[in-house]
Image (spheres, rainbow, N blue to C red):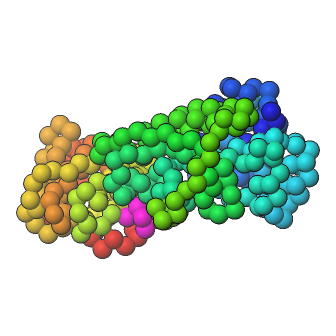
Amino acid sequence: MRIVFMGTPEFAETALRAIHAAYPDSIVGVVSRVDTPKNRGHAMTPPPVKKAALELGLLVYQPLNLKKENFEETLKEWNPDIIVVAAYGKILPKYVLDFPKYGCINIHASILPRYRGAAPIQRAIMAGETEIGVTIMQMAEGLDTGDMLAKASFPITSADVYGTIHDRLAEIGGSLCVETMASIVNGTAVAEKQDDTLSTYAAKIEKADRTLDLTKTTAEIVNTVRAFSPAPGAEAKLPSGKVKLTVVSALDEAPTGEPGTVAYLSPKGQGKLVVNTVDGKLSIERLIPEGKKEMSAGDFIRGRRITETDRFEITGETV
C-alpha cells in the first residue's frame, strides 16, 4: 500500500510515527504546511511533521496553496493508494480527495458529528464535556462531514487539561488510524453516515477566547483555563500587569465580593489566592506573570504582584 501523509502540528506527528511504525516502507510522501518564523529571532522553524518526516527519511512537500501550485503532478508521481490527513490545516481540493484508490481518511479529534472544525479539543473542554474522543472518517468536500469509519473515546474530569488530553488523543488517533487502514484494505471497514442535526462547530481559537471574564460562572472560568493549559494560557489582567492562569479549581463557597475581587490570599508555602466569581470562588494555584516563568500562587503573592484590594479585569475584552 502506497501512503501519503498530510499533517502539520504535534498531534499529526504522533500519527505519522504510528503509521510509519506499522508500514515502514509504505509512506511515499509527506505534505506539511510551510516553515514559520518563531520566537524573538524570527528564525524559520519547520512544523513538527516535517521534522519527524525528515528524521524518518521521508520525502516532504510544503505547498503554499494546493490549488495554485503544481501539487497534482507530485501526487501523480507518488501515486498513493490512500492519503491520511491529520490536522493539516488546509481544505483539500477535489482532485486530491478523488485521487487515491482508497480515498482520503482523516484523524479528527472529536466524537463526530460534534465539534467539526479547527479547534475540537479546546472547544470541547470549554463546553465542559465529560467525554472526549477521536474519529477516523472518510473525507468528503464538506467540513468534517464524511462518513465515520471508527471512533474511540474516554472520560475526562475537571482535573484534565488540554495538554494531557491532546497527547492521549494523539496516541489513540494514531493507533486507531493504523487499525482502520488495515480494515479498509481487507474490505472489513464499515462506514457510518453522520447525523448533521447533531453537529456542532469548533471555530478556530482567537485571542479573545483565551481572555478570562470573571463575570462568568466558576465552572466556565475553570474550563477556559483547562482548555489552554499548559499553553498558551488563559489571560487575565491585574493592576500589576497581565497574567496567564494555568492551574485553577472551583471552591464550594459563596462569593463574598464582586466578581474579580480577591476573596482572600496567603503567601505561605504554595500559597492561597482565591478570587470571587459571579456564582462562587475560584482558587488560583499556578500562573505565569508577564515576562516570567510559571510559579505558584505563593511565589506570586510573595513577589508583591497582588494584594487583597486588587481586582482582575472583568470585561472579557482582549488583553
Q: Main secondary structure of the magenta part?
A: helix
Q: Residue at x 21, y 43 (%)?
A: 298
Decide which of 214, 180 is in the foreground and name it: 180
Q: Residue at x 35, y 42 (%)?
A: 156
Direction from residue 256 to residue 243 in the image, left or right? right
Please tell me which residue lies in front, 229 or 128.
Answer: 128
Percent position of residue 106, x then y:
64, 48
Q: Quadrant of the N terminus?
A: top right
Q: Is residue 77 visible?
A: yes
Figure disc tally: 0
Q: Is residue 230 left or right of residue 147?
A: left
Horizontal relation, residue 158 to residue 319: left or right: left
Between residue 254 and residue 180, name the one nearer to us.
Answer: 180
Q: Where 24 sits versus 265, above or below? A: above
**Residue situated in front as seen by the camera: 29 or 98:** 98
Q: Residue at x 71, y 52 (%)?
A: 33
Q: Which residues are magenta?
A: 207-211
Is 245 within the magenta?
Answer: no
Query: Which quarter of the figure has residue 220?
Result: bottom left
